[in-house]
């Protein structure tokens, strides 16, 4: 399981303030903290900065790369901001474009960037008909989007399918439709990867962290191998390692025990002292 | 999901000392704490007291029932101790016999007790060939044990199948073989329940609580609806409620939100104050 640290995102108030004030120090601390917590990629998103997004993306990417050795996920609704971000990334480390969709206009803008920068790409399962509302919707969109990427020469291993998670509070099938979609798409395209924006599942309910943990664990059973997450949640990496071991994907629990030595498992309690 | 609180068990040092010293007060606190934490049943086990087990079971059941309104799970290798425990339980609350197995001698001793006391029963999937080592083994044992119980007149709803969990540290298929067994047996016998002795999965590895949480969440996806657990783990009940909601088994997340109001979800942190 590889984690894309989600925290450098101007939709978070503290981060937006740092970007407005040019507080490079905070951005660097946030990047480094995510690297130390076990992220494999740092997501960089300033999509709330309409008007100066290209300039802010430029600034953010430079700050992060000054301190951080990880590859980046360049995350924007604006193709121009994505291109600026990609142009600045260290080209020895394959970046991720976050994201392409099945929308015609988005396809036309992003596809050339994937091949030009030899990037991985997150393929969000929405299209011109809007957001998916069932597992079947997601499979239908995947059946258009994935072949289009493959036909353009993107290797299957560089495609990271994001089935789109909606909050469990909006309907009690929100979890099940994602599990089913991952299972069905994995069967059709065994070499692509899967990612979710984990925090979406708990949006609007008062129980966020624990819901995120449980949903990630369940998705790992179905084949999830990437996640855009709050990697600063001190248990997220530990739960992923455990879930992979329990799903039979960690020979001799070697990664789990290595993670234990790295400190991904906070202390346990003794409950019998009543 | 119904929880059987596992803590009154003389294999736990602090409990063994309380039983040896006749410390009724500690036993009562332990029973009440489990009831308050959300247990549906209190397991009572003094199986380490060979020689005076019947007498100790008698004493334990009386102490627990003095303070606790929950039905009990009477848990012993000794049929005589089980019978004594059953004879003392409040007969308005259906107890659980923990457990019957596919072993011929055990079957002959326990089957009459189930029907005499109209108890629920945990059906452990082992037989005279020993412990199961694959999902197929478990299905084979279930195919002997469940029909024998049904033929004796035990309603399917009173049968709680325990597929037997072995520690993940003993082999990396320990999780997967349980998921597969639950799925396959549920398909064949849709009306029986499923339980696991949750703590077994993490026995011998240094990461116990989090492993137990993740394993329970994964088993709930497959249909687990009972668990013998450390209900004093302050997150176990919350994770079960979440997993049921995510698996589409909690209409409008009503149980999840009720559990939130009851305090089954400890506080979350703010990670952005770096």
Image: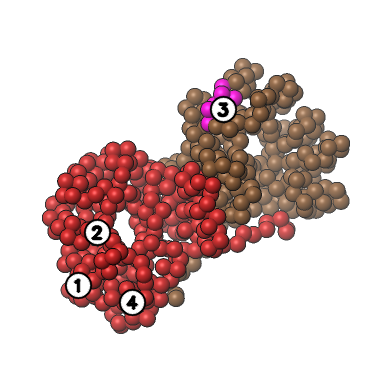
Chain colours: A red, B brown
* Quadrant in the picture for the N terminus of chain B: top right
Looking at the rendered structure, the secondary structure element under dot 3 is: helix
Of the pair B184 and A14, the residue shown nearer to us? B184
CA gap between label 2 and label 3 equals 47 Å
Dot in front, 2 or 1: 2
Residue named by callout 1: A54
Whichever of labels 2 and 1 marks the residue nearer the N terminus, that label is 1
Looking at the rendered structure, the secondary structure element under dot 1 is: helix
Q: Where does the magenta region start and end?
A: B135-143
Q: Residues within 10 Å of mark 2 (few under 14, many from 20)?
A: many
Residue named by callout 4: A66
CA gap between label 4 and label 1 equals 19 Å
Q: Residue at x 24, y 59 (%)?
A: A119
Q: Quadrant of residue B120?
A: top right
Q: Residues within 10 Å of mark 1 (few under 14, many from 20)?
A: many
Residue named by callout 2: A119
Is disc 2 in the same subunit as disc 3?
no
- The residue marked by circle 4 belongs to what chain? A
Whether tag 2 and tag 3 are in contact, CB under 8 A, the answer is: no
Q: Quadrant of residue B235?
A: bottom right
């Amino acid at each position: 399981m590889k984690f894309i640290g989600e925290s450098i995102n101007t939709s978070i108030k503290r981060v937006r303030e740092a970007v407005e004030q040019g507080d490079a120090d905070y951005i660097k601390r946030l990047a480094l903290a995510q690297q130390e917590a076990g992220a494999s990629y740092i997501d960089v998103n300033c999509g709330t900065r309409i008007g100066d997004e290209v300039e802010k993306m430029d600034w953010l990417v430079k700050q992060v790369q000054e301190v951080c050795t990880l590859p980046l996920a360049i995350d924007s609704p604006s193709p121009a901001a994505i291109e600026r971000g990609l142009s600045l990334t260290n080209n020895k480390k394959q970046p991720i474009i976050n994201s392409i969709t099945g929308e015609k206009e988005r396809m036309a803008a992003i596809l050339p960037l994937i091949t030009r920068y030899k990037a991985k790409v997150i393929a969000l399962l929405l299209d011109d008909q809007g957001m998916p509302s069932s597992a079947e919707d997601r499979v239908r969109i995947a059946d258009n989007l994935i072949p289009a990427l493959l036909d353009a020469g993107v290797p299957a291993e560089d495609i990271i399918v994001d089935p789109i998670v909606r909050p469990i509070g909006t309907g009690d099938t929100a979890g099940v439709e994602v599990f089913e979609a991952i299972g069905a798409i994995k069967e059709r395209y065994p070499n692509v990867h899967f990612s979710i924006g984990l925090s979406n599942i708990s949006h609007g309910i008062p129980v966020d962290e624990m819901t995120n943990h449980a949903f990630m664990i369940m998705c790992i059973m179905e084949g999830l191998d990437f996640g855009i997450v709050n990697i600063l949640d001190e248990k997220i990496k530990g739960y992923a390692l455990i879930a992979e071991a329990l799903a039979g994907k960690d020979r001799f629990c070697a990664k789990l025990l290595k993670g234990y030595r790295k400190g991904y498992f906070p202390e346990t309690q003794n409950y019998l002292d009543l």
